[in-house]
Image: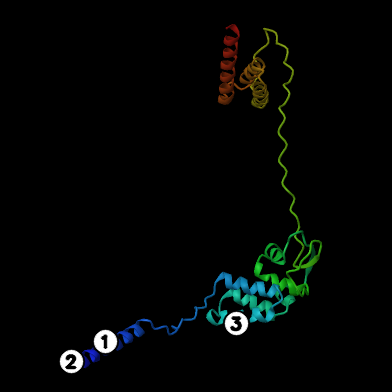
Amino acid sequence: MIRRLAGQGAAAFLLALSVAGCSHDERPKTVAPPVLTVTPERIDAIQTSLLAGDRKGADKQLKALQKLEPMNPRLQLLADSLDKDPQELLGPKSYPYTVQPGETITDVAERLLGNRLKAYQLARYNQLATPVALTAGQVLRIPGELPVARPQPTAPAPERPRRPAPAAKPAPAATAKPAANPAAAQHLRALGLAALNRGAVGEAVGLLRKARALDPGNALIARDLGRAERIEATVRANAKK
């Protein structure tokens, strides 16, 4: 009986060890490799390698991404930057440009060539071994024609108010009414409005009345005269207070 119980205890102990071993399996698990995708950051990394002088590293990165997207235009531009003649890409004509403090060749390419990814083409165009090491005052050749600065449009000079013509002497009572003269009436109207804008209300009323006499049917002159007379009446009323 004792032997039987001892045998059962040993079997239970071995079973427990087997279960514990299964629950603590520390074998290394297989990790899937990261999926390579074409992102702006990876394209910028290729550009950075090129400008740092790591042509082989950049070429390796570029070919890996071109397998994923062989028709990607940004990758094709970088491939052309590596393989093709920069004068063929950018043209033989050029003009000098002086590098400003803190300016990089990427800044120059973006501002003057319209594309920051053309920085390596511009570096090869200028035969720069280390494109990242630009210094202020350094002179680069920029492909194309020198931009011509457009003159800034000037604002027209403000129109000066015309001086009112001296008041004509009153005609004798027996003098006949003046003949209609629309052109002269318009001139007097303009002088009257100028006087009104200056605050010479009485002078404006006199000029506009003369204008109405020369062109009685002109509705604009009648309107301006009515406004001037109302202002004159207001001024007189305020003066009496």
Q: Residues within 10 Å of mark 3 (few under 14, many from 20)?
A: some
Identify the residue position indicated by label 2 in the image.
Answer: 1
Q: Quadrant of residue 94?
A: bottom right
Q: Tell me the SS state at disc 2.
A: loop
Q: Tell me the SS state at disc 3.
A: helix
Q: Say which residue appears at 54% left-offset and 75% top-offset.
A: 38
Q: Nearer the viewer, residue 228 or 28?
A: 28
Question: Where residue 227 sits in the image (x, y, percent)?
Answer: 57, 20
Q: Amino acid at mark 2?
A: Met
- 126 to 12, vertically: above or below: above
Q: Quadrant where the C terminus lies?
A: top right
* Relative to 173, 92 lies left or right: right
- Comes first in the chain, label 1 or label 2: 2
Question: Where residue 27 sits in the image (x, y, percent)?
Answer: 43, 85
- Comes first in the chain, label 1 or label 3: 1
Q: Residues within 10 Å of mark 2 (few under 14, many from 20)?
A: few
**1 vs 2, front mark:** 2
- Comes first in the chain, label 2 or label 3: 2
Q: CA distance from mark 1 to mark 3?
A: 61 Å
Identify the residue position indicated by label 1 in the image.
Answer: 12
CB-based contact (under 8 Å), mark 1 and mark 2? no
Q: Say which residue appears at 56% left-offset and 16% top-offset.
A: 230
Q: Amino acid at mark 3?
A: Lys
**Residue 122's disc number:** none
* Relative to 19, 180 lies left or right: right
Q: Nearer the viewer, residue 48 or 154?
A: 48
Question: Where residue 180 sits in the image (x, y, percent)?
Answer: 63, 22
Q: CA distance from mark 2 to mark 3?
A: 78 Å
Identify the residue position indicated by label 3 in the image.
Answer: 63
Q: Amino acid at mark 1?
A: Ala
Kindly give the residue lying farthest to the left in the view shown.
1
* Total tally of numbered discs in the picture: 3
